[in-house]
Amino acid sequence: MRPKISNRELLAFGQSLKAYRTAAKLTQEDLAALANLDRSYVGGEERGERNLTLLNLLTLSKALNARPAQLLAVFDNTIGKP
């Protein structure tokens, strides 16, 4: 049975994405343009309203000059835990 991803986990990723974006001094619009995504998509990710795809994770991390693992580091202490 596949583990269920909660809104809490989506929000945790969104907060990580926002932290990297603001540290890079980018607006949502700036990041969206660099990643060739819609600004509303970036906002939805930051609010935990969207379930990120692998391709968009790679695109966003490249736009932020970060490794995908850095954006996912928020989960390092929870991997394998219910």
Image (cartoon, rainbow, N blue to C red):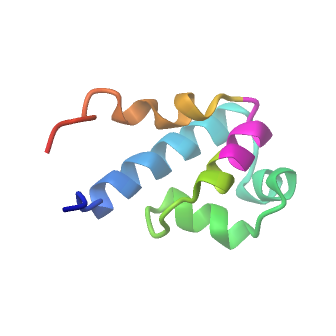
The quarter of the image holding the C terminus is top left
Q: Position of residue 5 (x, y in %)?
A: 29, 59
- Residue 67 within the segment the image draws in magenta: no
Q: Residue at image x 79%, y 41%?
A: 63
Q: Is residue 35 left or right of residue 60?
A: right
Q: Residue furthest front?
A: 1
Rendered view: 8 above or below 62: below
Rendered view: 82 above or below 73: below
Q: Residue at image x 78%, y 60%?
A: 29
Q: Residue furthest left?
A: 82
- Total marks placed: 0
Q: Position of residue 19 (x, y in %)?
A: 55, 38
Task: Choose top left, top right, bottom left or bottom right for residue 6.
Answer: bottom left
Q: Is residue 51 left or right of residue 57?
A: left
Q: Residue at image x 60%, y 35%?
A: 68
The quarter of the image holding the N terminus is bottom left
Q: Is residue 64 left or right of residue 12?
A: right
Q: Residue at image x 55%, y 68%?
A: 44
Between 31 and 27, the residue placed more toward the observer is 31
What's drawn in magenta, residue-wise?
Answer: 58-65
Magenta span: predominant SS is helix
Q: Position of residue 70 (x, y in %)?
A: 55, 28
Q: Position of residue 81 (x, y in %)?
A: 16, 37
